[in-house]
Image (cartoon, rainbow, N blue to C red):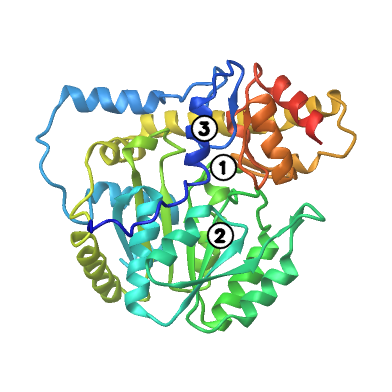
């Protein structure tokens, strides 16, 4: 008998598997609204000018490609801290933040999950209902029992906030609560400032562990505005974790540029936490890659490049909002009678369209419009050429 004879075929990833089906579809008018990638008005993955400028400078002064430290490039880690927590942050000034460069935001979540599992192996993890599909898988594979807290309300096209608070108030002390810092994936519905304040208060009072996933900083209302939740946890004096990704904001998907930051009570505590994070990384992938983090570090720390990046990021944010407005208008023009204005209240790259699994399947099979069965579509993949056919297709399945 073969060693692997008992291995069962795993189900395809719901998003990446759908992309495989999209690629195999011969329909010349097909549109992929499933994958979480920002495309420009020409339907292309953009290469940011700030990235090209940084790479040009790096090419003109080449350096040896030696192994990085386990926790990554020091200048990158510092730049991440200043971006996420603010350059004037007291926690940063006091050395209370342990930051490691990771393999994308996913890698930051996984390193954090492994660390927390060793720290408190009996704790549970709570994720929003719904959440990014990989959240559950990441924490399950780290050995956690994963449960959900209420979040999206399909009836009101909003957030079940009272039910969310009730779930958090009922959670056992030490439970890890995964929160979307901004641009909730997949729903697009974010907590407002007053709601965040209540969540912070409950988490602190209950002794829960906040783990913020911040993959879309700058895609909602702005870099500073999208980091407001982080500032609330800082002001509350809590220990918490933040996973950061630059895949979207720098259009560096394949470079896997991310970070994990852990806010601690003291500088000594942060040093001990960092030492443990490095042990976990060393036993997993040893150390991170160089190129993408060098690019991000150079852009964030070079004033001219930083201004260029902020302008390009703002351009992406504005285009997404414009596509939301255009989609609502085109749906009405296509004959959709129901009020689709809720799409305008959502933030970030995604929209919970309200379509059923059957309707999403019809969009794929009959019209070549690909979105996942939950009804989530990537608004950032719309443009002036495809939005008309997409709206017409949606109108036919509603």
Q: Residue furthest right?
A: 337
Q: Quadrant of the C terminus?
A: top right
Instruction: Looking at the image, tell me whether mark 2 or mark 1 is earlier in sequence order.
Output: 1
Label 1: element kind: loop
State the residue in front, 260 or 39.
39
Label 3: element kind: helix
Q: Residue at x 31, y 52 (%)?
A: 102
Distance in Å between CA atoms under marks 2 and 1? 13 Å
Q: Position of residue 333 (x, y in %)?
A: 85, 23
Q: Residue at x 52, y 42 (%)?
A: 15
Instruction: Looking at the image, tell me whether mark 3 or mark 1 is earlier in sequence order.
Output: 3
State the residue in front, 252 or 24.
24
Label 1: how many Cα within 10 Å (few below 14, some 14–19, many 20+) = some
Residue at numbered disc 2: 229
Indicate which label's residue lies in the foreground, 2 or 3.
3
Q: Position of residue 119 (x, y in %)?
A: 34, 78
Distance in Å between CA atoms under marks 3 and 1? 35 Å
Left or right: residue 73 versus residue 92 is left
Residue at numbered disc 3: 21
Q: Residue at x 68, y 57 (%)?
A: 192
Residue 241 visible in the picture: no
Q: Quadrant of residue 347?
A: top right
Q: Position of residue 208 (x, y in %)?
A: 51, 77
Left or right: residue 18 versus residue 115 is right
- Mark 2 vs 1: CB contact within 8 A: no
Residue at numbered disc 1: 222
Mark identifier at residue 92: none
Q: Quadrant of the N terminus?
A: bottom left
Q: Residue at x 33, y 60 (%)?
A: 6
- Mark 2 vs 3: CB contact within 8 A: no
Count of picture labels: 3
Residue 13 visible in the picture: yes
């Amino acid at each position: 008998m073969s060693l692997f004879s008992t291995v069962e075929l795993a189900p395809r990833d719901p998003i990446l598997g759908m992309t495989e089906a999209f690629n195999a579809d011969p329909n010349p008018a097909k549109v992929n609204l499933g994958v979480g990638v920002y495309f420009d008005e020409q339907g292309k993955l953009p290469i940011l000018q700030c990235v090209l400028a940084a790479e040009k400078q790096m090419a003109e002064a080449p350096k040896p490609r030696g192994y990085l430290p386990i926790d990554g490039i020091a200048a990158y880690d510092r730049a991440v801290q200043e971006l996420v927590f603010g350059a004037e942050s007291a926690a940063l000034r006091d050395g209370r933040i342990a930051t490691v460069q990771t393999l994308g935001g996913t890698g930051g979540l996984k390193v954090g999950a492994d660390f927390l599992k060793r720290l408190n192996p009996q704790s549970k993890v709570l994720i929003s209902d719904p959440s990014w599909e990989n959240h559950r898988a990441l924490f399950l594979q780290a050995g956690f029992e994963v449960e959900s807290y209420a979040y999206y309300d399909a009836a009101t096209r909003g957030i079940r906030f009272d039910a969310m608070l009730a779930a958090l108030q009922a959670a056992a002390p030490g439970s890890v609560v995964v929160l979307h810092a901004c641009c909730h994936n997949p729903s697009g519905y974010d907590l407002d400032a007053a709601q965040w304040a209540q969540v912070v208060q409950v988490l602190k009072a209950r002794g829960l562990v906040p783990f913020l996933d911040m993959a879309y900083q700058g895609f909602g209302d702005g870099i500073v505005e999208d980091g407001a939740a982080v500032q609330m946890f800082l002001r509350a004096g809590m220990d918490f974790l933040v996973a950061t990704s630059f895949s979207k904001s720098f259009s560096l998907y394949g470079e896997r540029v991310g970070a994990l930051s852990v806010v601690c009570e003291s500088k000594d505590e942060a040093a001990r936490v960092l030492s443990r994070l490095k042990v976990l990384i060393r036993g997993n992938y040893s150390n991170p890659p160089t190129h993408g983090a060098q690019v991000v570090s150079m852009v964030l720390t070079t004033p001219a490049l930083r201004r260029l990046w902020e302008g390009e990021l703002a351009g992406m944010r504005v285009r997404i909002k414009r596509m939301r407005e255009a989609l609502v208008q085109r749906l009405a023009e296509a004959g959709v009678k129901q009020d689709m204005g809720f799409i305008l209240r959502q933030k970030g790259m995604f929209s919970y369209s309200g379509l059923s699994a059957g309707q999403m399947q019809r969009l794929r099979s009959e019209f070549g419009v690909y979105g996942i069965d939950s009804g989530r579509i990537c608004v950032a993949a719309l443009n002036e050429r495809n939005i008309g056919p997409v709206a017409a297709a949606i109108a036919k399945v509603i």
